[in-house]
Amino acid sequence: MNSEPTPSFPSRLPNVGTTIFTVMSALATQHQAVNLGQGFPDFDCDAHLVDAVDAAMRAGHNQYPPMTGVPALREAIASKIEALYGRRYGAADEITVTAGATQAILTAILCCVGPGDEVIVLEPCYDSYVPNIELAGGTVVRVPLVPGTFRPDLDRIGAAITPRTRALIINTPHNPSGTVWSEADMLRLQELLAPTNVLLISDEVYEHMVYTPLRHESAARYPGLAARAFIVSSFGKTYHVTGWKIGYVAAPPALTAEFRKVHQFNVFTVNTPMQHGLATYMHNPAPYLELPAFYAAKRDLFRQGLATTRFQVLPCEGTYFQCVGISDLAVSERDLPEAEFCQWLTREVGVAAIPLSAFYGDGFDQKIVRFCFAKKDETLRAALQRLARL
Ligand SMILES: Cc1ncc(COP(=O)(O)O)c(C=O)c1O
């Protein structure tokens, strides 16, 4: 029996509970629902990647790597960025390997944001941004993406910039909406930020999931953006290994230097054999070059199935997420708040989804939910069969 009292202290994040992704995945397991909620593949990664990591472990790459990442991996990342987006980052002073994009984003924010600083987020946004800014002591400034289309409203972003704005966080391709920023969007943003000291955190974890005819508009393509940007990506998304928690940040030397100050006292290093394995595997660009076609086929299968239901199928230009409107469903539960609808859908229909309201600070409810289609075709078919009766 432990009878000694635990001291109490004020929470650093009083408004944060368990994330909706964890809640919905637990509910999906409990009700044996098809889990199209949380964004992760239900299929295996390439066996060659596992072999490469296995070989690295057997070759003795099992101790601390350099703090900034294994040199061969940083070189491979720099070469990939140059080949795809035309900007050469220095492997030594501009690329840092991180424990996934989540750590990369937190570290980027902690290294440049402090009390009194404002950080602009574009809602709906990935759920870690806001608590990250709050942990740093910064002030969150929320700007909505255009309702209905989820495109960036550059005028509103411009209007939100003040002398206290330290950073802006963008995300393209966008979770949850699947929107992809255009060249015109990026050029407008470059123009907007040019006369300011605003830093850019560009969350590009879905960079390899952009569907024809669009291309990924990395901040690396735009010199005026790249000069002020922490560009974040994730191997978890690209190589179907979300559980490995490994990603990277590309940023100019001055930003990288500050980033690494925090990184070295945060995780210090990222697991060694995975880094060696990824460095070997990255020599072949085919896996990421073929990813759009791989996911476009799943997207099309899922969208074609949804088209025969009463769900309103919204555009999906990138990512492995498909958003749908629920207002026209034949069931009365369509009138429930999105979060309750998703719980009902999981329990009673056997398909888990994520409410879009989870991506807004005020829980804005627009009768849209998000499905993840990074699933085996048979999983998608099973989900469609269940959804057909709505
Ligand atoms: C937009 C966005 N950013 C960052 C992450 C986190 O990536 P990682 O798993 O590499 O930490 C995710 C994961 O879902 C995401 O959707």
Image (cartoon, helix red, strand yellow):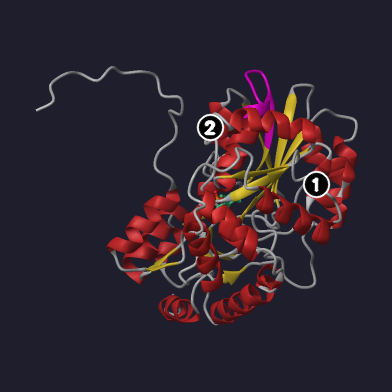
Question: Is residue 160 visible to the viewer in this orientation of the structure?
Answer: no
Between 313 and 72, the one lying in front of the other is 72
Q: Earlier in the sequence, mark 1 or mark 2?
A: 1
Taking the spot 48% from the left edge, 71% from the top edge, the residue there is: 44
Q: Is residue 32 magenta?
A: no
Looking at the image, residue 378 sits to the left or right of residue 108; the answer is left
Placement of 305 over or under 284, stated as above or below: below
Name the disc covering residue 89, or none. 1
Front residue of 48 and 155: 48
Mark 1 closeness class: few <14, some 14–19, many ≥20 residues within 10 Å? many
Number of disc labels: 2
Which amino acid, by three-letter code, is at mark 2? Asn
- What quarter of the picture does the C terminus occupy? bottom left
> Quick check: can you spot residue 122?
yes
Q: Which residues are magenta?
A: 110-120
Instruction: Compare residues 360 and 99 and report the one nearer the observer.
Output: 99
Asked if residue 109 lies left or right of residue 159, the reply is: left
- Residue 288, image quadrant: bottom right
